């Protein structure tokens, strides 16, 4: 903590800003260290909470991103957070670190895409789009992968639960936000993301009558973080 | 809608193309289990029209679907109910599209129904494509990697103890008034146990042919100190009851507070 | 992997060095990514084995170390290998402090009260007043809280140490001096003595026998004793 005594407006002795924040270059080192140490993304607020008083993590982040531009590891934005991830072109070096994941079925991949592009989406809506009933197990699988979670209940009769994608989903697929989903703009312009389920326009898809988790924990207050 | 038929699609394929189409449809029938429901089947059939999904002929598609179902029936392939529901609905749609509209009929027109089905197919196709694009991205754990040795964030828990003056004074008050009601504690030195009393009595009862005062069985060293005497009396009485229970002695008392007397049983 | 075709000495077609190694800057990116993603330190030989033919990990390491010199993370030699580690001066960012407040336990409060009312007081005297043995650990904790300190030794056989309360104690409890502590009579007048009966302890049954367990080990450093 460096105290700059040449500050034009000398603060009151008991003013906390008397202890000026460290120089920006130092703040950049700090966020660099924190992001390197963490496997999970950190938000600027989380970083600031650990930094000395008066730091501006977002400003330091601008410097850090520039510094790692084109490097072997990159500063990646993931939803509200930031994380270092290796550059995608160097994946071939990391054969030993490769995570062997069970291959998702085509149906599960499709369901995931529907949730990502239509979120928040109810199970009935997923079934409407896919034209078949969606097994509870498939959504469970996506939840287990931490790519999907419960969103807010819909304010429609029966107050059905909805599904949304998670920060882990963005991280896995290398997306900054859900706005960066491939082809999102085109799909929207083509009207393909509008809910257009009109009664009587098609054969009804019968759900299997299973109830989707009737009790969601009440605190989904921060679910908006991923979507604006 | 029929005018958007891709008439030229198979033009230069000739017979060969026809054979290939037939093979394709046979393959579809065999692979029925691979379909994710009727919409998926329609989408696959629609692709054989070799046009953009937005330009698909729903009438032709309905016919394709119905003939597919017909073939499947001929081959005695069991079809799930939703495939049959779709078939019935498409047959209805087909009649709506072919017959002149009935002015008295309520509800959506054939064209509206067809447009919605086209929309559903296009949307499903788009989602399928989106899924493919999504999974083709640089994925974590395959193309991009996280820090292999993350450093744990340690949480230093600091416990701050507090107390108020009231609590301090209450604690002191509690202590200073404790003496008045110190808990009763057993003083082992001044207690004659029932077992001890029993032992000394067993040796004596053989001589108790006549009624004798129970107190005479209290050991001499327990008689002088009132406290010790009280304890020994209780123990001796309890021991006497044990001997009665065992059938060794009899007890009697003439009246309340009168001396308790003891005598050996005659066997 | 860029092939430099302007190399002056064109190698023989079957020479393995025909496939020239990537530029050093690229090699530096590679070792940066590998060190980042690896769970364990990597030796230059291990890295070279993963890199395209002709790479020189040791040389790239010189560049990488220079690049991270003075940064928030550093390339550190660990045994035979290399790994990224947080710069030592930023270790404070890797720990989180959580302050919890807990109430002093009844036993500790009683001990403290005795010291306050009777100071200077020996441990034997405290035990006599409390009616139970007082663990050394408990007094140590009170000393650590800076509410109690050692007083003068008593001029009695064995010259036992005494305990007195500190300025910090007076501060915390809002007292000018220990003489401000109310006497027994005042406590009674303040209703503090009757409070016990109301608490349900009953006038005749002493305590709950829990924290007044007759035999506390003499050197019980278990600090749980201090709070409830």
Image (cartoon, coloured by chain):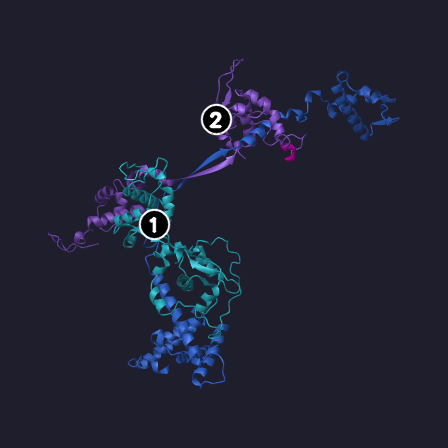
Chain colours: A cyan, B blue, C purple
In the rendered structure, are the residues bearing label 1 and label 2 in contact, judged by CB atoms less than 8 Å apart? Answer: no
| Residue C119 visible in image | yes
Q: Is residue A223 left or right of residue B6?
A: right
Q: Quadrant of residue A224?
A: bottom left
Q: Disc 1 and disc 2: Cα gap in Å?
A: 45 Å
The quadrant where residue B213 appears: top right
Q: Position of residue C63 (x, y in %)?
A: 22, 44
Q: Residues within 10 Å of mark 2 (few under 14, many from 20)?
A: some
Mark count = 2
Our reading of the magenta stretch's main secondary structure is helix
Locate the N terminus of chain C by quadrant.
Answer: bottom left
Check the residue under mark 2 and report the chain it is in. C
**Magenta range:** C195-200
| Residue pointed to by mark 1 | A83
Residue furthest left as drawn:
C8
Is residue B202 placed above or below B159 in the rendered structure? above
Protein chain holding label 1: A
Q: Which secondary structure, mark 1?
A: strand
Q: Nearer the viewer, residue B55 or A102?
A: B55
Which residue position holds label 2?
A: C143
Q: Position of residue A177 (x, y in %)?
A: 36, 57
Q: Is residue B31 visible?
A: no
The image shows residue A196, relative to residue C33, as above or below, that is below
Depth order, front residue of B238/B156:
B156
Q: Residue at x 65, y 35 (%)?
A: C198
Please tell me whether mark 2 sits on a helix, a strand or a loop.
helix
- B101 shown above or below A70: below
Residue B223 is left or right of residue C223, and the answer is right
Which quadrant would the C terminus of chain C be assigned to in this image?
top right
Decide if residue B45 is on the left or right side of residue B244. left
């Amino acid at each position: 903590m460096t105290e700059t005594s040449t500050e034009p407006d000398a603060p009151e002795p008991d003013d906390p800003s008397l202890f000026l924040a460290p120089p920006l270059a130092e703040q950049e080192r700090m966020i660099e260290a924190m992001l390197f140490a963490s496997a999970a993304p950190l938000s600027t607020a989380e970083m600031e909470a650990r930094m000395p008083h008066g730091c501006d993590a977002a400003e330091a982040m601008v410097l850090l991103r520039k510094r790692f531009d084109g490097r072997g590891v990159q500063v990646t934005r993931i939803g509200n957070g930031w994380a270092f991830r290796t550059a995608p072109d160097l994946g071939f070096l990391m054969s030993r670190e490769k995570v062997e994941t069970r291959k998702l079925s085509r149906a599960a991949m499709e369901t995931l895409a529907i949730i990502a592009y239509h979120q928040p989406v109810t199970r009935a809506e997923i079934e409407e789009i896919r034209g078949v009933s969606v097994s509870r197990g498939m959504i469970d699988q996506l939840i287990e992968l931490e790519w999907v979670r419960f969103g807010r209940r819909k304010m429609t009769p029966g107050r059905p639960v909805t599904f949304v994608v998670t920060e882990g989903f963005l991280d896995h697929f290398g997306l900054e936000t859900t706005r960066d989903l491939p082809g999102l703009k085109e799909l929207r312009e083509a009207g393909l993301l509008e809910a257009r389920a009109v009664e009587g326009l098609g054969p009804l898809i019968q759900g299997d009558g299973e109830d989707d988790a009737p009790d969601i924990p009440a605190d989904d207050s921060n679910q908006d973080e991923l979507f604006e | 809608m029929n005018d958007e038929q891709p008439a030229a699609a198979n033009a230069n394929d000739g017979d060969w193309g026809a054979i290939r189409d037939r093979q394709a449809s046979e393959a579809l029938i065999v692979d029925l289990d691979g379909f994710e429901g009727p919409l998926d089947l329609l989408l696959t059939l629609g692709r054989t029209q070799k046009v953009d999904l937005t330009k698909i002929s729903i009438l032709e598609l309905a016919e394709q679907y119905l003939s597919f179902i017909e073939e499947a029936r001929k081959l005695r392939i069991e079809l799930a109910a939703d495939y049959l529901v779709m078939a019935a609905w498409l047959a209805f749609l087909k009649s709506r599209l072919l017959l002149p509209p009935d002015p008295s009929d309520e509800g959506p027109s054939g064209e509206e129904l067809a447009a919605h089905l086209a929309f559903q197919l296009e949307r499903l196709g788009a989602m399928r494509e989106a899924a493919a694009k999504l999974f083709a991205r640089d994925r974590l754990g395959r193309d991009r990697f996280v820090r292999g040795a993350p450093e744990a964030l340690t949480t230093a828990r600091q416990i701050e103890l507090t107390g108020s003056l009231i609590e301090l004074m209450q604690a002191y008050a509690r202590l200073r008034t404790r003496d008045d009601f110190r808990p009763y504690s057993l003083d082992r030195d001044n207690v004659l146990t029932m077992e001890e009393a029993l032992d000394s009595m067993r040796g004596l009862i053989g001589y108790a042919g006549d009624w004798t005062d129970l107190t005479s069985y209290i050991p001499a060293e327990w008689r002088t100190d009132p406290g010790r005497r009280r304890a020994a009396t209780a123990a001796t009485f309890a021991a006497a009851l044990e001997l009665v229970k065992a059938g060794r002695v009899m007890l009697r008392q003439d009246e309340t507070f009168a001396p308790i007397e003891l005598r050996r049983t005659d066997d």
